[in-house]
Amino acid sequence: MPNTYYYACDECQQYVARADKVEYITCQYCNMPLTYQGFKDEALRYYQYIHGERCHCFVYYDGVGNKYSYVPEDNYSYFCATNGSLYWYDNETARWYRRGERPLENSLALTSTQPSRAIGARVSTRTVNYNGMSHALTVVSDIGGYHLVYSPTGLSELVNRVPNDKILIRIPRNTEAPLPQDGFKYGCSWRKDFDISIPWIYNARTLASDGFYIVAKIPHKFNPKNKRHFDQVKRVLTNMSAQGYGPDFRPDNIRFEENGDLVLIDFSENPAVRNTDEDDFPALMKEFSEQFAACGESPKSLYNELRAGMSYDFRKKMDNALHAWEK
């Protein structure tokens, strides 16, 4: 197992993991010096008292700098943000909650361990330069592991003749995120392979130099009671089961236009799904289907309906598949 050295930016609250130790390293976002956090590996845990949470926990890291905290009194492992706050993800509401914000036992769809990407701590406001002007932004979503999503808040239009409330800016959270120009290529691939739309990207020609996406804001969340919504989700899941790969297709990553068309809004995370081992893909599809089913009033019934178009053999593989936290 390779050595891993961890650094953190006190300004942006981002972790950086390196295979070698360096005397001086700066943040890619704010250019501030990073603070050395110590040497750890994937297997090492250490005991810590978190003052902000008033609890003792075992803290450990994965191989890319994501930090987790197991709290014995809760019998649960939380994401540990760099500001010291602990979070857990509820599949039932598709939301992140701070420890103590909502009782763990209130959720039947609670994840019993962490997904592979940490939420980290967000930068709530920032500015970007675009078309020779500086624009103020405010964060609107920090759920994704690879990107923070912002809305422009200034009086001047970020995109000429497009109202600011009709666009969003997706900014890579860390160096693990695909470069925007590569993410755009992945999105085009999903559009071609699965006949699925991605948002209009206003700066598609300058992604490499901009370092972020300016995308059209898609208005509606998945509503399982909307037949057109449900049928499109079912079609994509069915096609993915047949092809054996696909995008990171879950409720947080899709939206719907006013006319009901499905749009894959988080289209750049290609390695998270396409490189999945063949044996793990049914487990991933099981997770996707469960998350969509949890959006409705009868999750078990919706889950079975979402799988109805899949082959018997693939449904059997899903039935026998273990979630990542069960392995």
Image: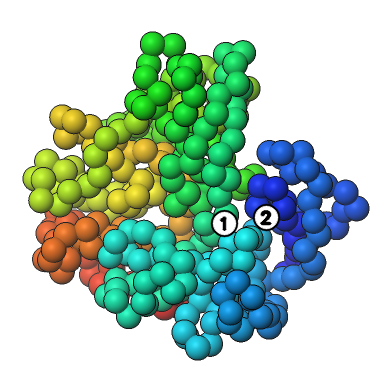
Q: Mark 1, residues whose alpha carbon is within 10 Å: few (<14), some, or many (≥20)?
A: many
| Total numbered badges shown on the rendered structure | 2
The residue sitting at the bottom extreme is 73
Amino acid at pointer 2: Tyr
Residue 188, quarter of the rendered image: top left
Tell me what residue is drawn at x 44 percent, y 46 percent: 141
Along the polypeptide, which appears first: circle 2 or circle 1? 2
Q: Nearer the viewer, residue 88 or 199?
A: 88
One can see residue 282 in this view: no
Residue 131, compared with residue 62, is above or below; it is above
Residue 13 x/y as whole percent: 65, 52
Residue 132, compared with residue 170, is above or below; it is above
Amino acid at pointer 1: Gly
How far apart marks 2 and 1 lie (CA) works out to 8 Å
Tell me what residue is drawn at x 75 percent, y 60 percent: 6
The residue sitting at the front extreme is 155
In this image, 274 relative to 72: left or right?
left
Residue 247 x/y as whole percent: 38, 45
Tell me what residue is drawn at x 27 percent, y 35 percent: 219
Q: Secondary structure at mark 2?
A: strand
Q: Mark 1 sits on what residue?
A: 120
Q: Mark 2 sits on what residue?
A: 15
Q: Nearer the viewer, residue 148 or 52?
A: 52
Q: Mark 2, residues whose alpha carbon is within 10 Å: few (<14), some, or many (≥20)?
A: many
Marks 2,1: beta carbons within 8 A: yes
Which quadrant is home to the C terminus?
Answer: bottom left
